[in-house]
Image: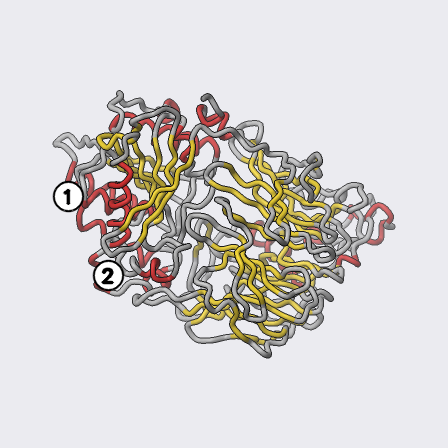
Amino acid sequence: MTTAFSDLDQYLALPRVDGIALSPDGTRVALTVSTLDPDGTGYRRAVWSVPAVGDGTPVRLTRSAKGESGTAFTRNGDLLFVSGRPDADGGADDTAQLWLLPAGGGEARPVTRLAGGTGGVLATASAADVVAVTADLLPTPATGERVGVVTRDAALRKRRDDKKVSAILHESYPVRYWDHDLGPDQTHVLGIDLGDLTDPTALEPATGVTTAASAAESTEDRAVSYPAHLPTPVDLTPQPGRALDHVSGALTPDGSTLVAAVGVPEVRGHRSVLVAIDVATAERTVLFDDPDVDHELPTISHDGTTIAWVRTVRSTPAGANQQEVWVASVDGSGARRIATEWDRWPNELVFEHGDGALLATADQDGRAPVFRLPLDGAAVEQLTHDDWAYSGLRVADATGVVVALRASWAAPLHPVRIDADGTVTPLATPAALPAVPGRLEEVDTTAADGARVRGWLVLPEGDGPHPLLLWIHGGPLNSWNQWSWRWNPMLAAARGYAVLLPDPALSTGYGLDFVNRGWNAWGQAPYTDLMAITDTVVARSDIDETRTAALGGSFGGYMANWVAGHTDRFRAVVTHASLWALEQFNGTTDSSDYWQSIFDADGMHENDPHRFVEDIVTPMLVIHGDKDYRVPIGEGLRLWSELAEHHAGPDGTMAHRFLLFPDENHWILKPQHASVWYQTVFAFLAQHVLDEPWERPELLG
């Protein structure tokens, strides 16, 4: 069967749903949809509207050269989004700002014009015109001023730009995160009263709209002034330091209080605590703060009286701990744990209509169902019973309509409506689900310690026997339970490969004991689980056990390296963004405090893959991005150096290959580079698994 997966250009051009919002009355769903830009070197997002029922026609709401993201609805049904587009006043043409699209129609209007841009909508109030947004501001002296911070930030940014200063002075750890440097600015939360938003076309020139008279202002004055027709942002988090790098939160319905998970600085990094911030005064009250405990994912009930969150005791080399769901009054009183017998880790929490329970999604057995967690202590109910993974739960404030996104390995993200009885209805989508060239089977085996190890097997057309690719997921606290555009087995199925997607020890969705089977011992149960389920699959008559390869990224890359050093059963190994030398990695990654806390000295040494470099006999394709801060480029460089040291011929040639992306990070995100990634991987596999001649991808010279 010829599909879009048979051709990389067609595949990369497939539209992709990647965000969802729900109007307060539950009638409209806003979808963020990414499409390939005209030159094929990036993706551009637009917002579409679809009815929250099972039919209807998608309607495109936004269109700009920069694209849109971060959608949310106001209490009146107006749509908020973030975009870097010019406004009618000629401003905000290069930075992402908050915009408002009126529910009754008309043109989108700017809400902010911040010199450093707007990060996104943190929370909206369901019964007030208050919205909380994140924004990065340069540090300034602690004056206690909450209104003038945006103009001071603009002035300081202009001076840095004029002097071409890019230096960053750090006063605490960390300094990087995933794919970007932290600083010199710091994340703040700003409160905005949308009731102060006026129509700039109705304003007199004196209010701040650019005219011939106002154009006489100096360039510097215009650079730091804030337009009078926009609501003035108020700083809710003065002098935050690095405490808000990963802030999450919710507003009470009246918009008076923001309940947020913020960081408290520690020796390296921070612990996450729950605070209540008075929107009018920025006065902060600590609700929950415990040593060696993280409080995260706060949400507020529709009536504004109850908060819910996830409480987790920090992991140590002895093992991970349960992620507990807690509730309390909005002032922090009466705190209690619910769902005490539920052995799952919630990915998200929202209150159902009526506030009698929480709705949650969580990994489970290779899926991610929707669960109902009653607040009265009753047993947890599973609402969805299918092979899908759900995310992006949204509940309409007025009507209780529930929508979400769902995906599996058979289909990418698409919107659905979920009824109280668990009935799921697909909604209209502008990104039609593509026909796929493979079918899914669930497979499992029993490990030596008696644990059940399961996974998905993607099978191509035909009876086989098919060559097999073992794909190892990252994380490691993760599950192969839904679609990935970056590691898509359907592309391999279109080329005749079967793909095994297993969940070994450390995977989520099988209980705490299953995670801890591989804790502080990454090269033990995770490795033997992978080999055991591979043994089971290659024993099938439709699989060719003589033509196999192993591939993995991040933790999966670590495991690919471990596999290469411990078995010769595979004909090729692909290792992407991989951990190679644990002691080196744990001191250079962007979050060394976490990685060093989950290993003791013996565990780090015994499970270090670089110690086994001399035992590698399988050709390896090493892939790394130079801007990867989670698994720094030093891991890939050292792996390549040591492969050459031990396995290069007298003339320096090797069977191994190193694909380096100088301007990519942990993920290969640019479409043209994703194409090169897949071309190189499939050429390497064709050479070693299928015995075809090596064909260097054309764009690599």
Q: Taking 217 as reference, is 592 left or right?
A: left
Is residue 192 shown above or below 106? below
Q: Which residue is the site of mark 1?
A: 615
Residue 329 in which image quadrant: bottom right
Secondary structure under the numbered disc 2 in the rendered image: helix
Say which label, 1 or 2, has the lower sequence index. 2
Whether residue 120 is visible here, answered yes or no, is no
Q: Residue furthest bottom?
A: 333
Whether residue 698 is visible here, answered yes or no, is yes
Q: Amino acid at mark 2?
A: Gly
In the rendered image, residue 599, in percent from the top left (x then y), is placed at 29, 62
State the residue at coordinates (51%, 66%).
310
Is residue 450 shown above or below 554? below
Q: Taking 231 as reference, is 341 left or right?
A: left
Is residue 331 shown above or below 11? below
- Look at the image and tell me in which quarter the C terminus lies: top left
State the residue at coordinates (26%, 36%).
538
Secondary structure under the numbered disc 1 in the rendered image: helix
Res. 603 mark = 2
Q: Taking 20 as reference, is 616 left or right?
A: left
Q: Taking 645 as reference, is 436 left or right?
A: right
What crowding class fits label 2: few (fewer than 14 Cα within 10 Å), some (14-19), or many (20 or more)? some
Residue nearest the observer in this picture, 133 or 526: 526
State the residue at coordinates (48%, 24%).
3
